[in-house]
Image: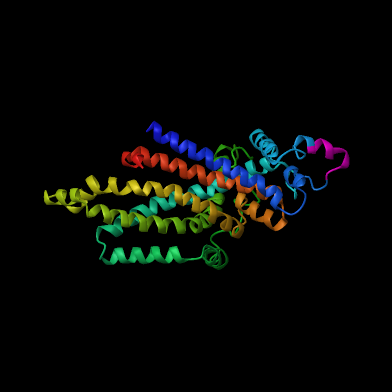
Amino acid sequence: MILYLLRRLFLLVFVFIALSILAFSLGYLFPGEPLQHFTGLRVIPVEQMAQLVAEYRMDQSYFQQYLAYLQRILSGDWGLSYSSQQPILQEIKTLLPATLELAAYALLISFFVGIPLGIIAAIKPDGIVSKAISALALAGYSLPIFWWALLLIMLFSLGLGWLPTAGRIGVLYEIPYQTGFMLVDILLADSQYQQEALYNALRHLLLPTLVLATFPTTVMIRFTRDSMLDVWEQSYIKTARAKGLNRAQVLYRHGLRNALLPVTRQIGLQFSALITLAMITEVIFSWPGVGRWLIDSIYQRNYPAIQSGLLVISTLVITANMLTEVLHTLFNPLARKR
């Protein structure tokens, strides 16, 4: 197990180095002056030019510049945003919890809805219920997320008026920023309208979460169903049924545990998909997260923000995949031999 973890750690370090090289290279690939892209200053005064060139080692080799870039990243100096002239790292720290909150709730929905439906669909694969669940999963998998989001907004927000169309909470509620996670901040806030604010935040959270959870839920349904059907054909399952155990007993005692082992790996993969799809969801619902901030930066040609946003999102995806891989290996010793 230790050797396996060392291999994964080496791979993780290698991927992070490659990612940092890509992010550093963007400073030269973007149009304009590289020093402006690294500092985030729209206009560099003449009297500061020599100081910045020496600090960022722009007069040295690319390797020395890359080492200086790594030092700045590790020390928290990510430059300034072109649009706001504020530190990029501070903006990311403020916006990242909103994205993680949305992705985490969507992942929970896909986990607690997709796995039970996948198990039900595998109990009688030729039954009406199984075919209905499979058809529902196929339809959800095929839906474009932007079209699905607009359809729900037209129905529940514009048509019925049940849910709000944008934002994380109503403008009437003043919630102090503590953790960045809205529901947690509401619970930590000592406010007389805490319950009303919590209800309002949940109403704002419902539609974006449902839209974002649609794709991973359908994937989880199909993957759990296929995994259950594969386990159902194994010899130990047939032996257990030959001993007289009914289908429910075999499913609970023998099939479920082994069938869910491959499903655990899908959690990390679906988190990666959620981070990507969250960018579209945040734009549609005006959700103040990193995804919307990054897309706005692309439209504004905010090159330092694009550079840092790519680094942050890629790090999230790689870390989630690696942690999921390690957890899967802990539960499945056979995976350590690969």
Query: Residue at point 30% right, 63% down?
Result: 130
Residue 85 drawn at (x, y percent): 76, 45
Residue at the far right: name it: 47
- Nearer to us in this view, 100 or 154: 100
- Up-down relation of residue 237 to residue 69 (above or below): below
- What residue span does the magenta drawing correspond to? 44-53
Is residue 47 part of the magenta span, yes or no?
yes
**Side (left or right) of 223 relative to 311:** left
Residue 76 drawn at (x, y percent): 66, 35
**Residue 174 at least partly seen:** no
Looking at the image, how many numbered discs can be counted on the residues? Answer: 0
Q: Quadrant of residue 157?
A: bottom right
Residue 135 drawn at (x, y percent): 36, 67
- Up-down relation of residue 130 to residue 267 (above or below): below
Residue 131 drawn at (x, y percent): 31, 66
- Up-down relation of residue 55 to residue 309 (above or below): above
**Side (left or right) of 133 relative to 170:** left
Dominant secondary structure (helix, strand or loop) of the stretch shown in magenta: helix
- Nearer to us in this view, 130 or 219: 219
Query: Residue at point 53% right, 40% down?
Result: 14
Is residue 34 part of the magenta span, yes or no?
no
Q: Quadrant of the C terminus?
A: top left
**Side (left or right) of 135 relative to 318:** left
**Residue 281 at least partly seen:** yes
Residue at the far left: name it: 243
Q: Quadrant of the N terminus?
A: top left
- Nearer to us in this view, 144 or 186: 144
Q: In which quarter of the image is residue 133?
A: bottom left
Query: Residue at point 16% right, 48% down?
Result: 240
